Amino acid sequence: MRFHLPNMNCGGCARSVTRAIQSVDADASIVIDQNRREVELTSDLPIDRFASALAAAGFPVVPATS
């Protein structure tokens, strides 16, 4: 699954995003592209759990288009 995170501006934001994702699934595979403000993750858990955790951490998500 891939998300666009308009509020992810820096390395600190990327670390916060990683922590939010890992709070849902510690074993999720996470790839962050800070330049595009996107995160791609692989997990067996539902997408809405990650979207909720990211929004609660201050990073409301927009589905990525590519």
Image: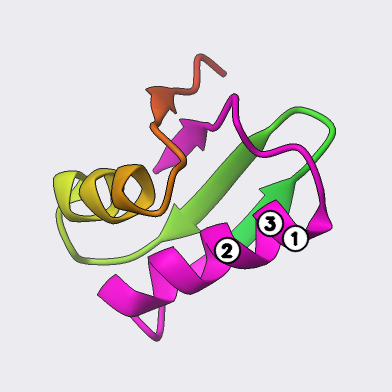
| Amino acid type, callout 2 | Ser
**x then y, percent, for residue 34:** 79, 41
Q: Residue at x 33, y 77 (%)?
A: 23
Please tell me whether mark 1 or mark 3 is closer to you in this view: 1
CB contact under 8 Å: marks 3 and 2: yes
Q: Which residue is mark 3?
A: 14
Q: Is residue 40 left or right of residue 37?
A: left
Q: Residue at x 68, y 56 (%)?
A: 14
Q: Is residue 3 left or right of residue 49?
A: right
Q: Is residue 2 above or below residue 40?
A: above
Q: Which residue is mark 1?
A: 12
| Amino acid type, callout 1 | Gly
41 in magenta: no
Q: Is residue 2 above or below residue 32?
A: above
CB contact under 8 Å: marks 2 and 1: yes
3D distance between C-alphas at marks 1 and 3: 5 Å
Q: Is residue 46 left or right of residue 8?
A: left
27 in magenta: yes
Neighbourhood count class around disc 3 (C-alpha, 10 Å): few under 14, some 14–19, many 20 upward = many
Q: Secondary structure at mark 3?
A: helix
Number of numbered discs overlaid on the protein picture? 3
Badge number at residue 49: none
- The span picked out in magenta is 1-29
| Amino acid type, callout 3 | Ala
Q: Which residue is mark 2?
A: 16
CB contact under 8 Å: marks 1 and 3: yes
